[in-house]
Amino acid sequence: MSEANTRWGILYCPKGHGSKQREKIQKVLDDRGVQYDFVQSESSDSVERLMTMLIHNGYKTIVIVGGDSALNDAVNCLMGEEKQVRDQIALGVIPNGVMNDFARYWNFKEGNLEQTVDWLVSHRVRAIDLGCIRYTNKKGEACHRYFLNCVNVGLIADIMNQRRQARSLLGSRTLSFIVSIFVMIFHRMEYKMHVKINYDTVDRKVMTMCVGSGPGYGQTPSAVPYNGMLDVSLVYHAEVLQVFAGLWLLITGRFLNHRSVHPYRTREVEVVEAKYAQVGVDGRLLGVPVGSYRITVEQEVINFLIPD
């Protein structure tokens, strides 16, 4: 058995400069006698490159130190491998990102590093589901993207886009989020959508749609990543005050209680039309697909390290 079979591959995605956090993680690993090799990413492209390197060098335990977007990049890279390769690898996470929704679902918390590492050391593995969106890009190419958490279509994805643009100008994550929310008050709030869910057809104006294999940043709070199903939350028209009420319910975990929210559970969503509606996947903007697209679920395709 090669050394990489027993050593962990740690893919570190820094948040800011990150040197102190890296040193703290290494100390916790060393204190527990974990044998590991550390690699550090500089961008989303380097996450995929480094993930491929770890896989092809035989590492069977790969831990992502990062947020939802980094975990999404790693999962998509892993799904590019043959099933017999994937089945031998256990993927873990140490939350270290702007959004750590999938990690929080499993009770991995950014401020509880020691407990997180102890759980990873116990090596309890669960096969989990992935959602998948299949679409055509602006070049006319057939594409697909897997997700652990959710796909957002419409307003929430548009806020992501506004936030990205604001951050490029302002630099601050918090300030850019506040500015993007303010800008959205005067922005397009509804999108003409034609969506098929189970035996239902929705052909009307929709504010936002979330399709979650996981908790969906509070928009699909009942979704679980191991039942072979997708949860869908469709939000119809709401006045400005209702939007703020919805944000409060989202923050407090009661999003489905909002009267404009219509929940579904399904194995597939077909978006026949969603004019001008941006699409976000696990917190990262995908853009506006060309024509129709499908969102499905693949059951128990990734081995994930979970708490005791």
Image: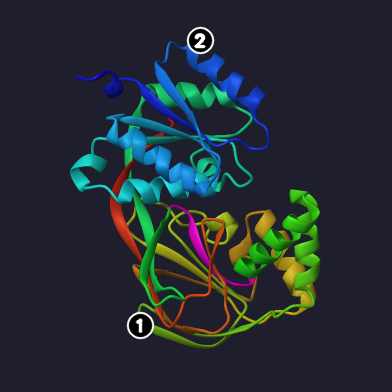
Image check: 123 left or right of 215? Answer: left
Image check: 250 left or right of 305? Answer: right
**1 or 2: tag closer to the N-terminus:** 2
Q: Amino acid at mark 1?
A: Tyr
Furthest residue to the bottom? 203
Identified at 21% across, 48% down, the residue is 82
Q: Is residue 136 magenta?
A: no
SS for dot 2: helix
Q: Which residues are magenta?
A: 148-155
Separation of residues labelled 1 and 2 (CA atoms): 55 Å
Q: Amino acid at mark 2?
A: Asp
Mark 1 crowdedness (10 Å alpha carbons): few <14, some 14-19, many ≥20: few
Quarter of the image with the C terminus is top left
Identified at 70% across, 60% down, the residue is 163
Q: Is residue 293 above or below residue 121?
A: below
Res. 90 in view: no
| Magenta span: chief secondary structure | strand
Tell us which disc is closer to us: 1 or 2. 2
Give percent across and percent down for residue 128.
34, 47
Quarter of the image with the N terminus is top left
Give percent across and percent down for residue 149.
48, 54
Q: Is residue 157 above or below residue 178?
A: below
Q: Is residue 82 above or below residue 114?
A: below
Q: On the image, numbered disc 2 is attached to which residue?
A: 31
Image check: 63 left or right of 228? Answer: right
Mark 2 crowdedness (10 Å alpha carbons): few <14, some 14-19, many ≥20: few
Q: Are marks 1 and 2 in contact (CB under 8 Å)?
A: no
Identified at 37% across, 54% down, the residue is 130
Q: On the image, numbered disc 1 is attached to which residue?
A: 199
Q: Is residue 97 above or below residue 193?
A: above
Give percent across and percent down for residue 241.
79, 73
SS for dot 1: loop
